[in-house]
Amino acid sequence: MNAATPGADGFHPATPFGSSDFDSRQFRTAMGQFCTGVTVITTLDADGRPAGFACQSFAALSLDPPLVLFCPQKTSRTWAVIEQRGAFCVNVLAHRQQDVSASFGAPREDKFAGVAWDPSPSGLPVIRHSLTWVDCTIENVTDGGDHHIVIGRAQTLGDVLQDKPLLFYRGGYLSTEHPRVTPAQAELENFLTWTGGDTWL
């Protein structure tokens, strides 16, 4: 709706409503309107013990070279372990894994209690029944306010489980239903993870 179009109540706003006076809670609420997947980033500490945390701020970054990114809090104890290891594994959770997300999202000592996992080729924890996983080495770390922006280079890709993803939206979980409707290619040519038939991907 533009400025010349009346709303349902007949009001004609000159500009979209908004405020430059907001706090962190309001910012979090606004960003919660963006639906994301849920991952668990895992690694091993110096003694070979598994470590991990639930991570919403994950994305594919580049196809050539194959890069991903995630954003841990600077105060994260798990991030300190990942940084020391220099490598991590991204586990993309399926819709049945809300309990896994809850376990790794809580500040508990043994987040792997009751969670089945297997070692990746590099030895890092791969959580069973995840949609897929990717083993990465740390390529670069950049400042991102109260978070780090961690860029990783994909080394090994896991198999893809044909299931629905676990999604996070407005502070809660939801999932999709198959089959999905795919828009035309022209609408998706800037989407890094679009899996259409063109050869650009």
Image (spheres, rainbow, N blue to C red):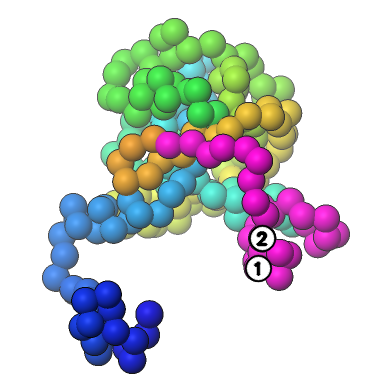
Label number found at residue 183: 2
Q: Residue at x 21, y 76 (%)?
A: 9
Going by the image, does 51 lie left or right of 128? left
Q: Is residue 27 above or below residue 158?
A: below
Residue at image mark 1: 187
Q: Residue 19: say if magenta.
A: no
3 vs 168, nearest the viewer? 3
Residue 130 point in image, percent of width and height = 59, 25
Q: Amino acid at mark 1?
A: Glu
Q: Is the C-beta separation of discs 1 and 2 under 8 Å?
A: yes
149 vs 129, nearest the viewer? 129
Residue 12 point in image, percent of width and height = 24, 87
Q: Is residue 85 visible?
A: no
Task: State which region is magenta.
Answer: 174-201
Q: Residue at x 48, y 17 (%)?
A: 50
Q: Is residue 98 above or below residue 19?
A: above
SS for tag 1?
A: helix
Q: Is residue 48 visible?
A: yes
Total marks shown come to 2
Q: Main secondary structure of the magenta part?
A: loop
Q: Quadrant of residue 92?
A: top right
Q: Quadrant of residue 157?
A: top right
Q: Is residue 65 above or below residue 56?
A: below
Q: Residues within 10 Å of mark 1 (few under 14, many from 20)?
A: few
